[in-house]
């Protein structure tokens, strides 16, 4: 269907809200109507090879025969910046549409979804400046570096938590390269045409229970062994991968900084906190149509897509 203006479908929701199952069912429902669809991953941690258990990466069986883009494309020593992810995802979306395939963007990284769909430009970067600031961070710590940012640009520092080392380094880098930095995100303004956004609603108590069950299952499935193996492949050197929920807690356990039980409980608590934060991000986007989580969500989404593609 190359002559049809295919929509970009975005499926949003916090971790453990059931996005993978709904996304796969949606593609099967669309295929039954003669509308091919493929999934474009928008989860910042699924890009890493070997990070399978702790990211709840969908297995080949769970993908249901549906092509999934941007999964297992990087080593844990590499950094998946938002700007890089934006370019990769937009290229995958364009490729799908060029082949007459509906791209289904699915993931829980709200910032990444925003960057992919909206008019979201990134200042340039300089490896030498970044390396110098990273060295300074290692020497003085995040709060001291944040204090330096506050002295240079109080407005920029006000929008960044003192403990957020990564954003503090980025702000200092951008200020050095361009003279200014803003921590305010762009407004909701689509850079892509034909976007349909949906969100999965799950009661908080149900979501909390799912997260607890998922983390315990991760431990039973061998998360500690997975992290130990990845540590031997450079996980600690990966600025992004090493900070993933579950992975940083297990690294702390392996380094003798905490007990295994404490690491597991910290992963549960941190994941629940992250889910609330991500849901807050998504809730601020007025363009998202919210649906009750579960099998029926795929049917409602399929009807909306059919209405655009088939005209009824």
Image (cartoon, rainbow, N blue to C red):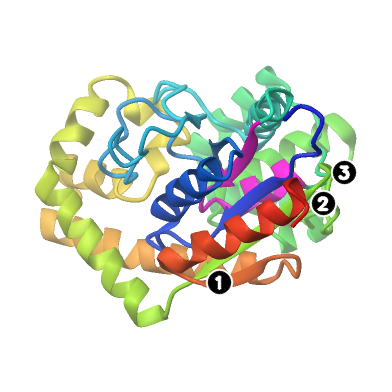
Residue 13 seen in render: no
Badge 2 marks a residue whose secondary structure is loop
| Within-10-Å neighbours for mark 3: few <14, some 14–19, many 20+ | some
Judged left or right of residue 179, residue 131 is: left
- Compared to residue 266, the image places residue 309 above or below, namely above
Observer-nearest residue: 50 or 179?
50
Q: Which residue is mark 2?
A: 182
Does residue 312 appear in the picture of this structure? Answer: yes
Front position in the image: 95 or 249 = 95
Q: What secondary structure is found at the residue carrying circle 1?
A: strand
Could you tell me which secondary element the residue under label 3 belongs to? Answer: loop
Is the Cβ of the residue at disc 2 closer than 8 Å to that at disc 3?
A: yes
Q: Which mark is residue 291?
A: 1
Q: CA distance from mark 2 to mark 3?
A: 7 Å
Residue 166 image point, x, y percent: 58, 43
Query: Label 3 to label 1, Cα distance in Å?
Result: 40 Å
Please check the rendered image and state whether residue 110 is part of the magenta-colored stretch, yes or no.
Answer: yes
Please name the residue shown 67% across and 53% down the image: 305
* Residue 180: numbered disc: 3
Give how far apart the Cα atoms at labels 1 and 2 are: 34 Å
Residues packed near mark 1 inside 10 Å, few (<14), some (14 to 19) or many (20 plus): some
Query: What are the residue bounds of the magenta stretch?
Result: 101-117
Disc 2 versus disc 3: nearer the observer: 2
Q: Residue 219's x, y, as percent?
A: 14, 50
């Amino acid at each position: 269907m190359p002559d049809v203006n295919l929509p970009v479908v975005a499926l949003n929701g916090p971790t453990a809200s059931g996005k993978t199952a709904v996304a796969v069912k949606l593609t099967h429902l669309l295929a039954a109507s003669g509308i091919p669809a493929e999934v474009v991953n928008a989860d910042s941690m699924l890009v890493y090879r070997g990070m399978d258990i702790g990211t709840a990466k969908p297995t080949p069986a769970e993908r249901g025969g549906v092509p999934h883009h941007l999964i297992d494309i990087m080593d844990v020593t590499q950094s998946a910046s938002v700007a890089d992810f934006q370019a990769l995802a937009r290229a995958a979306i364009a490729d799908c549409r060029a082949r007459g395939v509906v791209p289904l963007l699915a993931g829980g990284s709200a910032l990444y979804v925003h960057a992919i769909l909206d008019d979201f430009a990134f200042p340039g970067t300089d490896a030498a400046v970044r390396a110098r600031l990273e060295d300074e961070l290692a020497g003085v710590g995040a709060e001291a570096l944040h204090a330096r940012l506050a002295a240079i640009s109080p407005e920029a520092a006000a929008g960044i938590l003192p403990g957020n080392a990564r954003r503090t380094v980025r702000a200092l880098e951008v200020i050095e390269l361009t003279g200014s930095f803003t921590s305010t995100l762009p407004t909701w303004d689509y850079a892509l045409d034909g976007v349909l956004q949906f969100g999965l609603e799950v009661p908080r108590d149900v979501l909390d229970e799912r997260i607890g069950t998922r983390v315990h299952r991760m431990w039973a499935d061998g998360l500690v062994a997975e992290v130990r193996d990845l540590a031997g492949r450079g996980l600690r050197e990966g600025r992004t991968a090493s900070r993933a929920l579950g992975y940083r807690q297990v690294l702390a356990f392996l380094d003798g900084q905490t007990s295994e039980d404490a690491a597991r409980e910290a992963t549960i608590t941190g994941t629940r906190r992250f889910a609330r934060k991500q849901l807050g991000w998504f809730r601020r986007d007025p363009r998202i149509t919210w649906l009750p989580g579960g099998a029926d969500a795929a049917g409602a989404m399929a009807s909306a897509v059919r209405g655009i593609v088939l005209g009824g």
